[in-house]
């Protein structure tokens, strides 16, 4: 039947999904759920042979003209856990699975110039082989600051 899902989608694997290019859209919300702004998201990634790590750039093109660049490196350990790093967040980020979802929790300044370092809790859910849903919650001093709902779609 048209529109039915005919297969199970496995757990989200960043080292597979982010090889090549993805494009998607996101919606940022404040702590009360009010829409703050929208963005287009583009990632470009490749496997680095030295450590079998995925390196990818994630660029947020905000509707107000601002751009944010996040530069990621992730590698999967033998135990199935991930070690990740991002330029502004630093190294030592651990990725883990909660069911089939891939979850990262880390601190990162909102601006490249520095400032407060809120905690980001990011969850990726694979909804088809080519599409992943991303849900982000942001906390500052333990209080909800906002969040984002977005999707990434493989384009290659």
Image: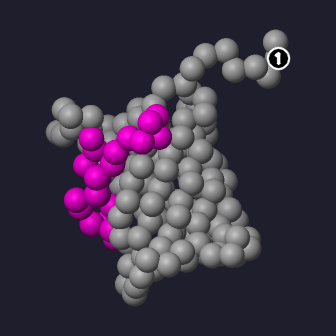
Would you call the spot at circle 1 few (<14 residues within 10 Å), some (14-19), or many (20 or more)?
A: few
**Rendering coords of residue 98 (x, y %):** 42, 42
| Figure check: 119 above or below 124 | below
- Tell me the residue at 44%/65% (across/down): 120
Q: Is residue 102 magenta?
A: no
Q: How many marks?
A: 1
Front position in the image: 51 or 98: 98
- Residue plotted at (44% across, 77% down): 142
Q: Is residue 51 left or right of residue 67?
A: left
Element class at badge 1: loop
- Can residue 120 be seen here? The reply is yes
- Horizontal and vertical percent for residue 24? 64, 49
Q: Quadrant of the N terminus?
A: top right
Q: Position of residue 23 (x, y in %)?
A: 61, 46
Q: Note whether 23 is above or below 122 in the view shown.
A: above
Please provide percent x and percent y for residue 88.
34, 70
- By secondary structure, the bulk of the magenta-drawn segment is best described as strand
| Outermost residue toward the right in this view | 2
- Identify which residue is drawn at 38% across, 79% down: 117
Q: Give the magenta part as a residue range.
A: 81-101
Let me know if residue 82 is in the magenta part. Answer: yes
Q: Quadrant of residue 3?
A: top right
Per the image, the residue denoted by label 1 is 2
In the picture provided, is 140 more to the left or to the right than 151?
Answer: left
Q: Does residue 127 lie above or below 112 as drawn?
A: above
Q: Is residue 155 visible?
A: no
Horizontally, residue 51 falls left or right of residue 113, namely left
Identity of the residue drawn at 55% across and 77% down: 145
The residue nearer to you, when weighing 68 against 26, is 26
The quarter of the image holding the C terminus is top right
Residue nearest the observer in this picture, 95 or 71: 95
């Amino acid at each position: 039947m048209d529109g039915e899902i005919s297969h199970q989608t496995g757990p989200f694997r960043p080292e597979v999904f982010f090889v090549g290019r993805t494009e998607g859209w996101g919606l940022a919300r404040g702590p009360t759920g009010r829409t703050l702004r929208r963005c287009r998201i583009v990632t470009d990634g490749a496997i680095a042979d030295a450590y079998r790590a995925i390196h990818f750039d994630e660029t947020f093109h905000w509707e107000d003209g601002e751009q944010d660049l996040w530069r990621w490196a992730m590698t999967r350990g033998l135990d199935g856990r991930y070690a990740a790093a991002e330029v502004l967040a630093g190294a030592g980020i651990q990725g883990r699975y909660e069911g089939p979802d891939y979850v990262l929790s880390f601190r990162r300044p909102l601006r490249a110039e520095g400032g407060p370092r809120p905690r980001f809790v990011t969850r990726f859910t694979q909804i088809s082989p080519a599409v992943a849903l991303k849900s982000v919650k942001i906390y500052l001093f333990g209080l909800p600051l906002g969040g984002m709902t977005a999707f990434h779609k493989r384009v290659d």
